Image (cartoon, rainbow, N blue to C red):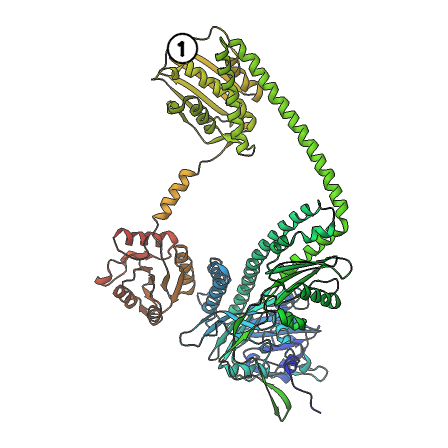
Amino acid sequence: MNEAVNLTNCDREPIHIPGSVQPFGFMLAVLSDFTICMASDKVGSFLGSDVADLLQQPLTSAISEAAVETIRGRVDYLSGPDATERLFGVELQAGKPLYDLSIHFSGVYLIVEAEPSVHEPGVNSGELVRLMLERIRKTRGMTELAREAARQLKVLTGFDRVMVYQFHPDGSGEVIAETAEAGLESFLGLRYPASDIPRQARALYQRNWLRIIADVNARSAALMSTATHNAGLLDLSMSVLRSVSPIHIEYLRNMGVAASMSVSILRDGKLWGLFACHHYSPRYISFDKRTASELFRQMFSWIVEGREREGDVAYEARAHQVQERLIEIAASHDHSRRAIVDFLGDYRKMIDCDGVAVWSDNKIALEGDTPTEDEVKDLVAFINRTSPGRIFASAEIAKVYAAGQAFRDRAAGFLAIPISRTPRDCLIFFRREVTRAVNWAGAPDKIYDEGPNGPRLTPRKSFELWQETVAGQSKPWSAADIRIAESLRVTLLEVILQLSDLAARERRGAQERQELMIAELNHRVRNILSLVRALVAQSKDTAMSVEEFASVLGGRIQALARAHDQITNLNWAPVALRTLLESEAGAYLGARAGRVKMGGPDVALDPKAFATLALVVHEMMTNSAKYGALADSTGSVEVVWRLDPSSSLVIEWKESGGPPVQPPSRRGFGTTIIERSVPFDLKGDAEIRFDLLGVQATFVIPPNFVELVPSIAGAAMRLEEQQSSRPRISETALIVEDNLIIAMAAEVILLDLGARHVDTAATVDQALRSIERTRPSFALLDLNLGSESSIKVAQKLKEIGVPFIFATGYGERAPLPVDLASAPVVQKPYTLEVVEHALGKLQQAGAQWSFVL
């Protein structure tokens, strides 16, 4: 009786042991003594020896001893079951062409695979990958990142079509980005069923990250072995030459594809998607470029993982903040169940949902879009029967809970969190139904035929758009949702099981904090009262009347108050010296504050130094207004400061234009503050001189109280002015350049200058087709393109009014037609500054180009 055919037949196809390899290279399997026990039957076309003559012979009978030693040296680096080593440009036989090798272990066998080295002049794969990465790092959002990555891989490999194919949770895959040659039907947005890539194929993609099929019609080279070994059972999971499943070959032929390459994209070690490359004629990519593609996919995988993780981290951080606040508030509740129910709104802020329900102590609470109370009770009973004590989530409720069909329009998806030890109480998040159209690449079904070999799977032949409307599903629950749910579950269990102890500890902690705050407040109040008492006692000795006493004392206390306000406004951080001077001048002189000139570096003072200096400046300002330069309408004060070699702050006070100065007959409290505050409180220096033409004073503040704060306002303004005047490129730019590395470097420059998209062309025909397809806003033209020049392209651009710049190794001496003689010419190799300068020349010439701001 024949076995029934279903989708699992394809899943059971042993694609890892095909018993053959693709013919663009050869394979040898050797034992631990380096004796050949298996070989591909076309090895003779590469090494000149028939496969029968190589079996049971030492490896040195096929390749040179030097090559064998090179391989031996790399074997030591093979660690782990999936480890491979690659060698490039190895001379297998003296005087013969070079080969690229891949070696790995398969069980007890050392597998040596070789293919002829391909030398591509001027191509540096490492530099290409660096430029490709620079390009994709400038993208924003996943869509733009995937689209640009596909475009860069197409430039590197030359395939007709390159797609980024992302897997969905149900195993199906969707083309989220695509770049293809003109005239090809677009696959962008199409969905492919999970059966198109069977499970064992996905497992191989997760282990072996790059798979090339150079020619779907090429005849495979069978593996031959000695009688004691079975080549048909050799595991080729990590092989670079492994031949292709007949089912997959038929699938590609049905799509019209003649060659393909798949490059795995992983996240957290799991298969996230693929770079799927198609060519409509046979296409072989050198081992060097395939290695570069693999390196690019690894960096791309990290970027994808990083960008997705950024979103998850921000999402989880917000949830964590809500969770911490929930813990703090819950600790004050006397009854644990009431605490759980009271936070429905907070739960909704933690996990993206449309509604939430809590079932606790046989009572239910609902918020948002949810099923009815009775429907939720039945759902809780179902959850406790089928998934007790575990988080349970589904984006299609009717699929796991038949009764959910009745309310799927209100709650198509649910995530349940148990919140008690016994399977009774739970918290449930709901999401509404999201009806959407899915565009399948053909009907997602496969056909089964009965043939001479019995029932077999036949790949579908149609890939035309087939649209399906999907209903009854919500937005899927993400891994981040599940992590937040698990964290919330632990938190709620902790709240319920240990709420009393937590509340008691919190109360004790609050009491201790209150006692500490009271002690600190008492200390500060005592200090303030002592300072005020001293100001009162000293001020009364110099006052001639009650009014004068009130004025002097009030001024000094007000100076301290202003200093305190400025310090506390910055959370007790250092305050700018200029702020202190401007505040005192404005508070005391009002409209006359402009008579106080000041200048010096931007420095800030420690709060202690700031408060001390506030009293000193207040006394200096008061004395000047009463007796000195500010007492006269023509007088002025100049305050300048600098940092001396020891980084101490030196402040110079100079008065001029006021009445003649008479030294005081006695030292009052104000003079004492001026002369002694800085030395006593700050261990600095203070000196005041009563010169006939004006009072002068010098104060030195030690460096431990001083912080240099560079002024950035002027620099920022100059930078803004400079940037605003820079010529910029808008929309699409065109590069015509026959050297790939130079073109990729120029791409980065034009993107830095504002271009949103950059198209590249290596020939005149490609450039003209690109212009016809998309009108650029600017073009950078390599004048000499091998056997042709870009003059025709320049004339076309001039005709349609698109600005351009020539680039050439001949620089300004390059011969140009008369009608193009005014075009700027830059000398290779050019930089961002060189191209920007040339753009500026266009702007200065008065050309009204759309890209020039």
Residue 268, relative to residue 438: is it above or below?
above
Residue denoted by label 1: 661
Q: Quadrant of residue 49?
A: bottom right
Q: Residue at x 46, y 67 (%)?
A: 151
Q: Amino acid at mark 1?
A: Val
CA neighbours of label 1 inside 10 A, class few (<14), some (14 to 19), many (20+) = some
Count the marks: how many?
A: 1
Please identify the residue farthest to the top as the structure is shown: 665
Q: Nearer the viewer, residue 774 or 778?
A: 774
**Quarter in which the N terminus is drawn:** bottom right
Q: Is residue 478 visible?
A: no
Q: Position of residue 523 (x, y in %)?
A: 65, 25
Q: Position of residue 648 (x, y in %)?
A: 51, 26
Q: Residue at x 69, y 31 (%)?
A: 516
Q: Nearer the viewer, residue 34 or 282?
A: 282
Q: Position of residue 416 (x, y in %)?
A: 68, 62
